[in-house]
Amino acid sequence: MIHSLLIANRGEIACRIIRTCRRLGIRTVAVYADADVNALHVKMADTAVHIGPSPAPDSYLNIPAIIAATQRAGADAVHPGFGFLAENADFARACTAASLIFVGPSPEAIALMGNKRAAKERVTTVGVPIIPGYGGVDQSDERFLAEATRIGFPVLVKAAAGGGGKGMRLVAEAAALPEALAAARREAQQAFGSDELILEKALIHARHVEIQVFGDRHGNLIHLGERECSLQRRHQKVIEEAPSPAVNKELRQRMGATAVRAAQTVHYHNAGTVEFLLDETGDFYFLEMNTRLQVEHPVTELVTGLDLVEWQIRVAEGEALPLTQAQITWRGHAIEARLYAENPANDFLPVTGDVLLWRPPDGDGVRVDGGIQTGNAVSIHYDPMLAKIVAYGDDRATAVRRLTRALETTTLLGFAHNIPFLADVLHHPEVMDGRMHIRFLAEHFANWQPPVGDVALALMAVTVAQFEHEPQPATSQGYWRNNPQQPQIYHYEWDGEVVEARLTPVPRVRRHFHVALSTQPDHMADVLLTDMAGHQLILTVDGWRQRLTAVNKQNIWWVQTEKGVVRLTAVPLLPEPQPAADAGGSLRAPMPGSVLAVLVVVGQEVKGGDALLKLEAMKMEHTIRAAGDGIVEEIYYQPGDTVEADAQLIKIKTLRVSENP
């Protein structure tokens, strides 16, 4: 039996594994890098071992450091979670060599199914249908172009050793293929240590449906039903649910049996997922097999009533599966949304920042798997997924409604995130009806903008909060001033403009004010501060009682209203002069990250839209492009350098019309 389990991961999955281990009476060991010294998974575990600097290759991907941590902490087993080393056959072998129980499949299964080309070759031997494509030894651009032409555009370029959307590019025409190949190779090499690629025919309006499989070391292998994962951006799942609205009992049986056959080809044991594309005619095609626990496993747990981490542990201990295929039943509906530190209105670019306030939702049927807490920092070094918010109901409509309300009542202040986007997606009529496909978000939410919070209400709340925190005489029955008729003046910057708020306390009535805003010059609001406790404020404005949450750091206020979050910067009455902004030809980093490649040289003439530099942040690659025609004057960073957000990367001299050849 396992007595002490080291979790070779971080964040929400580490916390989720710890919860099951507590219930089973298993001692837990966390590992952490410099950036995670105060992380929630470190605090939750029974003990924790430092494994290196913040960059993942130096810590969470450092196999010798993790094996050494197990020996130092006295662990007898390792759970890899998902991501990092979860699908690394060398890591599984290293655990076995160190006499550790590896909570996962065999190294042989990981190696074979971890390569998409080899996996497809294997599963076709048992009649599993695959998508037309190419995965040969010849990895030249010329061969890929010839094969893409044969298959027919659009095609998908994919990392052979990859997953999670890394190293994947959708290519609509031949001219875009070389750049897509180069970018996919770089991203695949960095994420998986292999730049081998494959091609697949792109099925634009198919659904992404996956089957959860589970096997033991006694030859038993079953499936636990399907999950719908079609709502994706950049080939990364965003919202998942079980069961799929497109799958009936007969199709579930066929897809489940096919998934089991695929897993049996590698004598699979422990948790795994076989992923398919389901087209509009009801035909399905093998995509890949993930040899690990999936991010979206909670929806399967909720509709089956099972704890998949417990099953993983028991199988790793040598037990047989607790249930047979005939004993698996499904009840109700579950749907999950992934909470990311990213800006959906800015091409889903990852963001960093401090978690000034995190307050997860609650309520009937709501489950939160999170890895953050108030006071944490979101860094550039790891995937931007912070938590999963899951809802269950007796039917799909109830589950969707509960998840929507859970998102609306979640508080996360300190940086941009995708909660408003997720709520808007769930409100879409076609999503409510279960009519989705893998291109749905790209087609329906390409120009999405976040809802504007109630700015006037936020201004009133911040003004009242600031006034309340000003020192008052102890003997004052109201608000003593030597000029009581004069309003208190506050200035805030919102959306690039300065707004003035004038607050006048009502004499001899505690917490009662008149507030005038420069944005509403013809209205004087009657404001009563009904309650204020911590970050929570209840304001009654002109007879309308409303609840708000506000947090302040370094004169920046984040206010959550019912309509959305408002960010206000308190401006002093006598602000210090600010230095002039850099020239418009300067290109700045949209987020913190590291430079992957510089694609130009000093003196080179560029055109608007030309790729200048590749930046990696939070495991995603981003291309910095020229805003207009010009000549490269200076390059401030080179490959491998770390850059901060808004750092000047390249200086370009803008060409006048007469200067163009």
Image: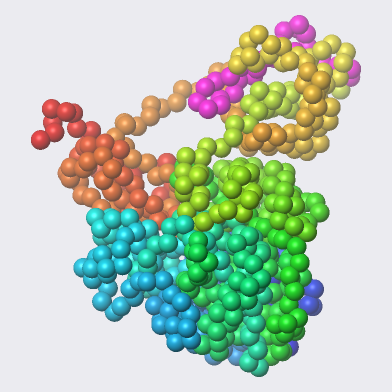
Q: Quadrant of the C terminus?
A: top left
The reply to whether the magenta stretch includes residue 114 is: no
Q: Residue at x 23, y 33 (%)?
A: 654
Q: Of 325 and 641, which appears nearest the observer?
A: 325
Q: Is residue 266 above or below residue 196?
A: below
In the rendered image, which quarter is residue 594 located in?
bottom left
User: Residue 332: percent from the left, percent from the top?
Assistant: 75, 62
In the rendered image, which quarter is residue 475 located in?
top right
Q: Residue at x 66, y 71 (%)?
A: 249
Q: Is residue 465 above or below residue 627?
A: above
Q: With 159 as the anchor, is 270 left or right in this view?
A: right
Q: Of 544 and 602, which appears nearest the observer?
A: 544
Q: Of 641 and 201, which appears nearest the observer?
A: 201
Q: With 149 as the anchor, is 102 left or right in this view?
A: right
The total of numbered circles placed on residues is 0
Q: With 329 as the anchor, is 30 left or right in this view?
A: left
Q: Residue at x 53, y 71 (%)?
A: 275
Residue furthest to the bottom: 218
Q: Is residue 302 visible?
A: yes
User: Residue 33: percent from the left, percent from the top?
Assistant: 56, 65
In the rendered image, which quarter is residue 395 located in?
bottom right
User: Residue 120: percent from the left, percent from the top?
Assistant: 43, 79
Q: Quadrant of the N terminus?
A: bottom right
User: Residue 513: percent from the left, percent from the top?
Assistant: 78, 16
Q: Is residue 205 above or below residue 353?
A: below
Q: Residue at x 72, y 85 (%)?
A: 324
The reply to whether the magenta stretch includes residue 476 is: yes
Q: Is residue 78 visible?
A: no
- Residue bounds of the magenta highlight: 475-504
Q: With 619 as the anchor, is 528 left or right in this view?
A: right
